[in-house]
């Protein structure tokens, strides 16, 4: 990491003043004079303030809380299972009406059980997409099969998908035995029946003994309506297990480069083998939601696919997995970015942190595999943090070992602190009093014979905190960073980015 432009985590530096960023910040770093008069009425003339005279960034409106404490309605669960590459994820996308599950014409793309909300003829339910079921699989395949079996145990009904063009295989027969033992209602989907000529292939699946096979083309939608009608008949009105719809508990996204330990952390927090873990990088493809009880509260943790170094050059399921990760971040309130402590901080790590900051989400940095550090590596890690993460000194740091569970209990206090700051609102009177004292002690430098004055300040929004400065002239980036730094010193804002925009007063026409 060389500290170049791509390592900078402040995207708002848009003014070239002829001095370096550090030099610009140093202009305002003198200590505030303790003898400044507390009476600063002369700094702001609120009675003469007219917002219509100013141009610049639009002031965002504050619409209150966008999140609810209600955990939502309990919905029945339909698990979609079958052997690898029979079209389960494509069928899931057809059922939910959007391309949400990652698909590719390659076996084994889906690895975990992933929940999606669906609606058919006014009836809401949850669809569980699962990985390919391979009763004889070993290693990663065995873990994927275990997740599929768990999905059946949690389901109220099962949609068993078979490739009609191939027919019933030995693996399909083995899955049928397991489904019978589970004693759940089963609907048989004969997939890849793209026209009348292949409907005879579907009829051959009566031999499985699961009742009528419903011919369907997940890719084109043919027969999907009849299939869903049958699935709704199989689903009970009152769910046995059920799944709560998205929303309610505060959402925490686990982000990081591949193989950094995100899935291991989720499994440790959940207290079960919720997500497939393998030494192979990129095991997780679809974002995996899980409700977890921690610190007396219910949280929704979202495990995501690892963000690779060059997303724009990714192809196939890796490309779509990166899109799902970005979407998961957009839906989250706070992101926990995992960094491998025993490895040097990379450009990839700083880019992920920058992505979180630019998205406006609260941020916690977790240094994973801390149990593998020796004293020498610990020394160099501190130097790397000072050099490469200089733009996010406000982010809480937690040192953990996801594999053993060491210090993972410290994540919740850090997340709660970040979310509290993310929600924080400063009263306008107190904010202007603080800004007035600050400006009186450290006025904006004179540029081009003019000295910009801040006339009024307001916090326009939260989540993240957004401040608007009404000024007589443009406020340069270095001075805005200085104000941000002092805002953090005075009010905290630990774990949240802060956005400061400027609206400049127009010259009056004479």
Image (tube, rainbow, N blue to C red):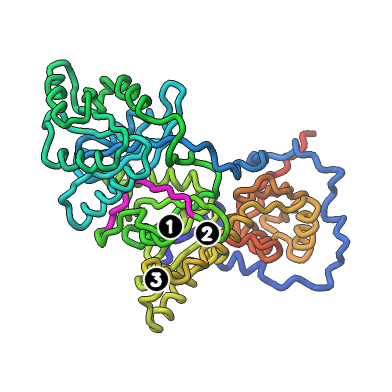
Q: CA distance from mark 3 to mark 2?
A: 24 Å
- Disc number placed over residue 294 in the picture, else none: 2
Q: Which badge, 3 or 2, is on the more N-terminal residue? A: 2
Q: Check disc 2: other Cα within 10 Å, few if <14, some if 14-19, many if 20+.
A: few
Q: Residue at x 13, y 21 (%)?
A: 198
Q: CA distance from mark 3 to mark 1?
A: 23 Å
Q: Secondary structure at mark 3?
A: loop
Q: Is residue 458 magenta?
A: no
Vertical placement of 326 versus 415: above or below? Answer: above
Vertical placement of 232 versus 287: above or below? Answer: above
Report whether 180 appears left or right of 288: left
Where is residue 424 drawn, in percent x and y? 67, 53
Vertical placement of 439 versus 243: above or below? Answer: below
Choose top left, top right, bottom left or bottom right for residue 478: bottom right
Where is residue 150 drawn, in percent x and y? 32, 48
Vertical placement of 411 versus 503: above or below? Answer: below
Q: Which badge, 2 or 1, is on the more N-terminal residue? A: 1
Q: Which residue is mark 3?
A: 341
Q: Nearer the viewer, residue 208 or 281?
A: 208
Where is residue 371 drawn, in percent x and y? 39, 76
Q: Quadrant location of the C terminus?
A: top right
Residues in magenta, as a range: 281-292
Q: Residue at x 16, y 26 (%)?
A: 206
**Residue 59 appears in the picture as rendered:** no
Q: Which residue is mark 1?
A: 270
Report whether 130 appears left or right of 447: left
């Amino acid at each position: 990491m060389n500290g170049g432009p791509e390592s900078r985590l402040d995207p708002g530096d848009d003014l070239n003043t002829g001095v370096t960023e550090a030099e610009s910040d140093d202009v305002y770093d003198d200590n505030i004079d303790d003898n400044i008069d507390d009476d600063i009425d002369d700094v702001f003339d609120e009675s003469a303030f007219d917002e219509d005279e100013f141009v610049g960034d639009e002031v965002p409106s504050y619409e209150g809380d966008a999140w609810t404490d209600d955990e939502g309605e309990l919905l029945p669960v339909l698990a979609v299972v079958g052997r690898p590459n029979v079209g389960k994820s494509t069928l899931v996308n057809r059922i939910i009406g959007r391309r949400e599950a990652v698909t590719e014409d390659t076996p084994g793309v889906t690895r975990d059980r992933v929940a999606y909300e669906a609606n058919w003829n006014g009836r809401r339910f949850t669809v569980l997409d699962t990985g390919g079921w391979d009763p004889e699989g070993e290693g990663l395949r065995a873990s994927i099969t275990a997740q599929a079996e768990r999905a059946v145990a949690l389901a109220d009904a099962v949609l068993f998908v078979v490739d009609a063009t191939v027919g019933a295989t030995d693996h399909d027969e083995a899955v049928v035995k397991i489904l019978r033992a589970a004693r759940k209602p089963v609907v048989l989907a004969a997939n890849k029946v793209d026209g009348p000529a292949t409907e005879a292939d579907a009829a051959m699946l009566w031999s499985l003994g699961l009742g009528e096979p419903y011919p369907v083309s997940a890719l084109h939608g043919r027969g999907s309506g009849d299939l869903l009608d049958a699935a709704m008949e199989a689903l009970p009105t009152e769910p046995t297990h059920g799944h709560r719809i998205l929303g309610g508990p505060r959402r925490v996204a686990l982000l990081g480069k591949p193989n950094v330990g995100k899935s291991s952390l989720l499994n440790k927090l959940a207290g079960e083998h919720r997500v497939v873990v393998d030494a192979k990088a990129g095991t997780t493809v679809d974002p995996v939601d899980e409700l977890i009880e921690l610190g007396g509260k219910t949280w929704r943790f979202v495990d995501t696919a690892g963000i690779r170094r060059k997303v724009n050059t990714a192809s196939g399921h890796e490309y779509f997995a990166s899109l799902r990760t970005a979407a998961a971040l957009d839906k989250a309130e706070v992101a926990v970015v995992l960094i491998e402590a025993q490895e040097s901080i990379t450009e990839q790590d700083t880019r992920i942190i920058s992505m979180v900051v630019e998205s406006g989400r609260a941020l916690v940095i977790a240094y994973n595999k801390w149990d593998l550090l020796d004293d020498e590596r610990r020394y160099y890690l501190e130097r790397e943090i000072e050099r490469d993460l200089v733009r996010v000194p406000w982010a809480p740091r937690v040192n953990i070992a996801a594999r053993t569970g060491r210090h993972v209990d410290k994540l919740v206090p850090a997340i709660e602190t970040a979310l509290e700051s993310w929600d924080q609102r400063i009263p306008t009177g107190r904010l202007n009093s603080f800004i007035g004292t600050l400006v009186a002690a450290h006025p904006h430098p004179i540029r081009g014979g003019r000295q910009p004055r801040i006339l009024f300040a307001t916090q326009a929004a939260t989540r993240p905190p957004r401040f608007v400065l009404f000024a007589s002239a443009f406020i340069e980036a270095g001075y805005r960073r200085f104000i941000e730094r002092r805002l953090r010193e005075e009010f905290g804002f630990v774990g949240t980015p802060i956005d400061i925009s400027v609206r400049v007063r127009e010259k009056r026409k004479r």
